Amino acid sequence: MTTYTVEGWCRLPGAQKPLPLEQIHFSISDACHLQLEAVEHELQRTHRREEFIDIDIGELDLQMPPDCGPLSDCRLRVYLGGADNQRGHFHLVGHRAADRSLVYTNPIMVDQLM
């Protein structure tokens, strides 16, 4: 299991710009890492833009900042990016339980999970 601390963002319904959140902490299991790698390879093969992976919040050991509160749902968005547009990235995406605002983290390269 690998633990990450990443900057987070919150976009309120109807807002043009997201608001910064304090750091979001979460862990990625070895099984989830393998799933992220498989999705990265599938995106490279099919040239699709992105794919979402549903994930159990409890499996992430998710720690949200106090100014955000808990999430009602959570997924990992995997996409290809970078200069060659072939390197896999992922970030946590969910909705705040209190008001359904979109919450997400800065991206992490799938390669960094190794």
Image (tube, rainbow, N blue to C red):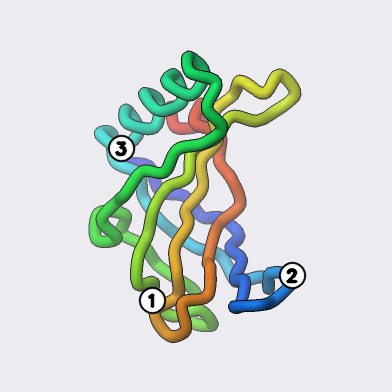
- Amino acid type of the residue that numbered disc 2 sits on in the rendered structure: Lys
What residue did someone put label 1 on? 70
Residue furthest top as drawn:
45
Q: Residues within 10 Å of mark 1 (few under 14, many from 20)?
A: some
Q: Which residue is mark 3?
A: 32
Q: Identity of the amino acid at label 3?
A: Cys
In the rendered image, which quarter contains the C terminus?
top left
Q: How many marks?
A: 3
Q: Residue at point 44% right, 32% down?
A: 113
From the viewer's side, name the closer residue of 26 and 44.
Answer: 44
Whether residues under marks 2 and 1 lie with C-beta atoms below 8 angstroms apart, the answer is: no
**Is disc 2 in contact with disc 3, using a CB cutoff of under 8 Å?**
no
Q: Does 5 sit above or below residue 89?
A: below
User: Is label 3 in a helix, a strand or a loop?
Assistant: helix
Q: Residue at x 36, y 43 (%)?
A: 53
Residue 62, horizontal then vertical, whole percent:
36, 62
Q: Earlier in the sequence, mark 2 or mark 3?
A: 2
Q: Is label 2 or label 1 in front? A: 2
Q: Is residue 81 above or below residue 93?
A: above
Relative image position of residue 80 (x, y in whole percent) = 59, 29
Tell me which numbered mark, 3 or 1, is placed earlier along the sequence. 3
For label 2, the residue is: 17
Front position in the image: 28 or 76: 76
Image vertical order of residue 103 relative to residue 15, above or below: above
- Disc 3 and disc 1 in contact, CB within 8 angstroms: no
| Quadrant containing the N terminus in the rendered view | top left
